[in-house]
Image: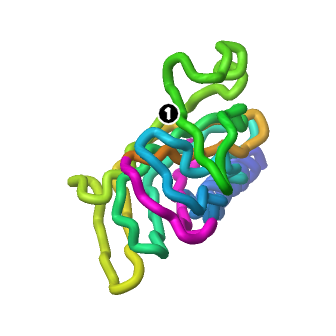
Amino acid sequence: MDRTRDLAQGLSRIENQVAKPKYKTIRVIPTIAAVEVEDGEVLFAPTEIPKACLPNGVSILKQIKVFDLADIKVDIDLIFTETAPTVEALTGVTAAKFNVVGGNSSDAIVQAANPLGAVILDVNGSNTTAFDYTDNAVYIQNSVDMFVTSKTGSVHVMGVATATKTYAAATNLIFDFIFEEAR
């Protein structure tokens, strides 16, 4: 009797592991500054990536896919935080510089945001696969391997420009973030 129960419990644990998908893709379309943006200016404000991990859990960001609908072909600094930090005014008519050191953010604001990491989306990098089409491009940044954690399960990403470029529409960039659930 105990052997049958133990066998059933073991089988149940195996089924639970098999039933849960290991990877998930979350699409995010941030509102970008539809103006000329200079190197170091905020390209898009902190944007939620919902369900990046389980509440109070951990996931690993494995890959970032970017659909560049305007074919801008420029690197972007992506900054990941647990909560949305207060950043300089941006988007719309003007964009503002994002300063890692000495910016408008206080130590308390930075600590409350709980920075998780940063990724330079290098459109010509060795870890990036680029597909350049007539009017758009797709970039796939592989081997990111960044741990993310959150009390709510959501994390936030903001973009900082690395060159002076003009973005014509507020939805020219679409991001697919691929996460592996840490077990």
Indicate the position of residue 73 as horizontal and vertical percent values.
34, 64
Image quarter where the C terminus lies is top right
The residue closer to the viewer here, 86 or 57, is 86
Tally the marks: 1
Indicate the position of residue 56 as horizontal and vertical percent values.
73, 34
Q: Does residue 36 lie above or below 110 as drawn?
A: below
In which quadrant of the rendered view does residue 63 lie? bottom left
- Residue at the extreme left of the image, as rendered: 126
| Drawn side of residue 140 relative to residue 99, left or right | left
The residue closer to the viewer here, 79 or 37, is 37
- Measuring 44% from the left and 44% from the top, which residue is drawn there? 77
- Measuring 50% from the left and 25% from the top, which residue is drawn there? 100
The residue identified by callout 1 is 117
- Measuring 54% from the left and 53% from the top, which residue is drawn there? 179
The residue segment tinted magenta is 163-183
Mark 1: give few (<14), some (14-19) or many (20+) Cα within 10 Å.
Answer: some
- Residue at the extreme front of the image, as rendered: 93
Indicate the position of residue 96 as horizontal and vertical percent values.
58, 40
Q: Does residue 125 lie above or below 167 as drawn?
A: above
